[in-house]
Image (cartoon, rainbow, N blue to C red):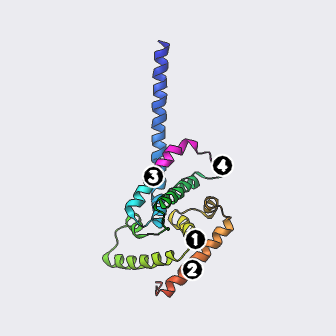
């Protein structure tokens, strides 16, 4: 009889533990999906592949969730380290350079704009894509983590192995380069 009660208790404990993990992961997914997706969009020029890589990121989060120890890194930083490594793995397999696409972010983030606004947005995005292509890989990564993933400079520094002040300098210089490229390309600020 005691064995039967223990088995019932053990099964209930496993069920509660599983339910708790499902709830925790659901909350993590709700909280980080949009930002991870935007970050990957900054780095990948293909919406279908962006969705696929985003799925891979969350699969890895599930697989490695119990091993997160925090050793000097926030949970958010850990998630974006997984995202960055997933993108790196993708490009290693494809053996090509990093490309950026912001085309699909607008569909995911903003409300439906008017046709005139769509034309203006497309022109602005095209200019931005061309300007981003002129930055080196490190600078594009820092810009992507800052504006795509919305990470703080301290988190970017930990992920990239840079100092916080170096991240700030890279961002400042990258934004100045982008501004110069955009202005030389005929882009006008409104």
**How many other residues sit within 10 Å of disc 4, few (<14), some (14-19) or many (≥20)?**
few
N-terminal label among 1 and 2: 1
Kindly check if marks 4 and 2 are in contact, taking CB atoms under 8 A apart as contact: no
**How many other residues sit within 10 Å of disc 1, few (<14), some (14-19) or many (≥20)?**
some
Horizontal and vertical percent for residue 74?
A: 61, 52
Q: Find the magenta span and give its range.
A: 57-70
**CA separation, marks 3 and 2?**
33 Å
N-terminal label among 4 and 3: 3
- Give the labeled residue for mark 3: 56
**How many other residues sit within 10 Å of disc 3, few (<14), some (14-19) or many (≥20)?**
some
Kindly check if marks 1 and 2 are in contact, taking CB atoms under 8 A apart as contact: yes
Q: Residue at x 45, y 46 (%)?
A: 26
N-terminal label among 4 and 1: 4
Magenta residues: mostly which secondary structure? helix
In the image, is residue 128 above or below residue 45?
A: below
- Give the labeled residue for mark 2: 177
N-terminal label among 3 and 1: 3
- Give the labeled residue for mark 1: 139
**CA separation, marks 4 and 2?**
35 Å
In the image, is residue 18 above or below residue 165?
A: above
**CA separation, marks 4 and 3?**
23 Å
Name the element at disc 1.
Answer: helix
* Residue 71 - label: 4
Asked if the stretch drawn in magenta spans residue 64, the answer is yes
Q: Residue at x 35, y 78 (%)?
A: 119
Pick the front one: 67 or 149:
67
**How many other residues sit within 10 Å of disc 2, few (<14), some (14-19) or many (≥20)?**
some
């Amino acid at each position: 009889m005691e064995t039967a009660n223990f088995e019932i208790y053990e099964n209930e404990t496993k069920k509660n533990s599983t339910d708790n993990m499902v709830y925790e992961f659901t909350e993590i997914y709700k909280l980080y999906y949009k930002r991870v997706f935007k970050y990957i969009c900054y780095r990948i020029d293909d919406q279908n592949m962006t969705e696929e890589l985003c799925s891979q990121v969350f699969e890895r989060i599930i697989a490695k969730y119990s091993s997160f120890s925090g050793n000097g890194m926030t949970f958010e930083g850990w998630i974006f380290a997984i995202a960055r490594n997933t993108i790196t793995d993708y490009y290693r397999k494809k053996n090509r350079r990093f490309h950026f696409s912001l085309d699909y972010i607008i569909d995911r983030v903003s409300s439906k704009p008017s046709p005139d606004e769509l034309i203006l947005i497309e022109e602005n995005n095209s200019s931005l894509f061309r300007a981003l292509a002129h930055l080196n890989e490190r600078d594009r990564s820092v810009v992507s983590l800052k504006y795509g993933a919305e990470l703080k400079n301290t988190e970017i520094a930990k992920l990239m192995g840079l100092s916080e002040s170096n991240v700030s300098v890279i961002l400042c210089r990258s934004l100045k380069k982008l501004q110069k490229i955009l202005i030389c390309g005929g882009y006008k600020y409104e």
